[in-house]
């Protein structure tokens, strides 16, 4: 049995599902943040798979998708830096990283 | 790449990804995430995306996860393990997960374009980094500059956020 595009899409979808389940299940902000990273990486995997299975006239993969992955990684790194700074500021103010303890905005 | 290696790395990625969610200790979660990212980098290499694979190891498994570990060690998160589990959240999360996997299966079953095997690449060496760089600096030059501004804004934002007093 040879590998097809569907195998990569299946694995990518499963990784996304794991990340999504983590965001729904977990109550610790840092773990939720790590699960967000998992979801971003699942999107990256499907982008790279589409790039490899879409070979152009010149016999090369479609590099536009890989440039998009490059941008996603850059934005994700910036997002992690800002998000972790917010978490540290939050911990300094409230001494917790548990989402159920932070409900001032809840009606 | 042979199918066996694909399944080994895919299973490694998925099992350690699941262990990120299951582990109650944040340090263990972060280390599992590193292993999961390494498996993902191997999958990128299997797709002939060598540059993205290297970037994945350097930026994600290296820089981002070290940042995560710093913050986890900085904050004292011992209280997390003493909390009792929220059964409603677990039931809801499980339900959503099952629905999502079922939907994924139904979509992929009806996707005939995904059935094709690896199309052959041009013979001879392929300059992966050169091609990505050419595309980045010619076709996508403006987004590249915008990302540079974004990183500058993020840096300034982090400096301001981590000041003691916000005035």
Image: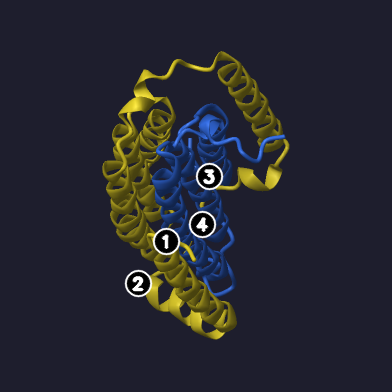
Q: In the image, residue A18 lies at what x, y percent?
A: 51, 33
Categorize mark 4 by other alpha carbons within 10 Å: few (<14), some (14-19), many (20+).
many
Q: Nearer the viewer, residue B101 or B153?
A: B153
Q: Are marks 4 and 2 on the same chain?
A: no
Report if residue A43 is visible in the image. Answer: yes
Q: From where the camera sits, is residue B127 visible?
A: no
- Residue topped by disc 3: A39
Chain letter belonging to callout 2:
B
Mark sitting on residue A48: 4
**What is the number of the mark on residue B165?**
1
How far from the left and from the top, in percent, is residue B81? 35, 22
Please give left or right for residue B137 compared with residue B114 in the image.
Answer: left
Neighbours of disc 2 within 10 Å: few (<14), some (14-19), many (20+): few
Distance Cα–Cα, label 3 vs label 1: 34 Å
Depth-wise, is mark 2 or mark 1 nearer the camera?
Answer: 1
Circles 3 and 1, Cβ within 8 Å, touching? The answer is no
Is residue B122 placed above or below A50 in the rendered structure? Answer: below
**Quarter of the rendering containing residue B99:** top right
Q: How many marks?
A: 4
Name the disc covering residue B125, or none.
2
Mark 1: which secondary structure? Answer: loop
Q: Do the residues bearing badges 4 and 2 touch, measured as CB atoms within 8 Å?
A: no
Chain in yellow? B
Closest to the observer, A34 or B119: A34
Q: Which comes sooner in the sequence, label 3 or label 4? A: 3
């Amino acid at each position: 049995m040879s590998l097809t595009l569907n195998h990569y899409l299946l694995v990518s979808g499963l990784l996304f599902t794991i990340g999504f389940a983590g965001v729904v299940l977990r109550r610790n902000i840092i773990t939720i943040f790590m699960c967000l990273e998992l979801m971003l990486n699942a999107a990256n995997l499907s982008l790279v798979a589409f790039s490899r299975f879409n070979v152009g006239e010149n016999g090369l993969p479609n590099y536009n998708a890989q440039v998009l992955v490059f941008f996603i990684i850059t934005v994700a790194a910036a997002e992690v830096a800002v998000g972790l700074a917010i978490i540290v500021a939050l911990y300094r103010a409230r001494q917790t990283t548990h989402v159920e303890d932070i409900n001032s905005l809840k009606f | 790449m042979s199918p066996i290696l694909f399944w080994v790395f895919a299973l490694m990625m998925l099992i350690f990804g699941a262990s990120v969610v299951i582990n109650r200790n944040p340090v263990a979660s972060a280390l599992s995430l590193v292993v999961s990212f390494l498996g993902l980098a191997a999958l990128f290499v299997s797709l002939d995306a060598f540059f993205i694979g290297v970037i994945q190891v350097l930026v994600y498994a290296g820089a981002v996860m070290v940042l995560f570990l710093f913050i986890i060690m900085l904050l004292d998160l011992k209280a997390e393990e003493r909390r009792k589990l929220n059964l409603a959240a677990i039931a809801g999360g499980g339900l959503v997960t099952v629905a999502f996997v079922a939907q994924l299966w139904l979509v992929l079953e009806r996707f005939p374009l995904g059935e094709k095997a690896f199309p052959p690449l041009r013979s001879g060496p392929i300059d992966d980094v050169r091609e990505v760089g050419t595309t980045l600096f010619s076709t996508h030059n403006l987004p590249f500059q915008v990302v540079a501004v974004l990183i500058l804004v993020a840096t300034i934002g982090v400096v301001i956020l981590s000041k003691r007093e916000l005035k």
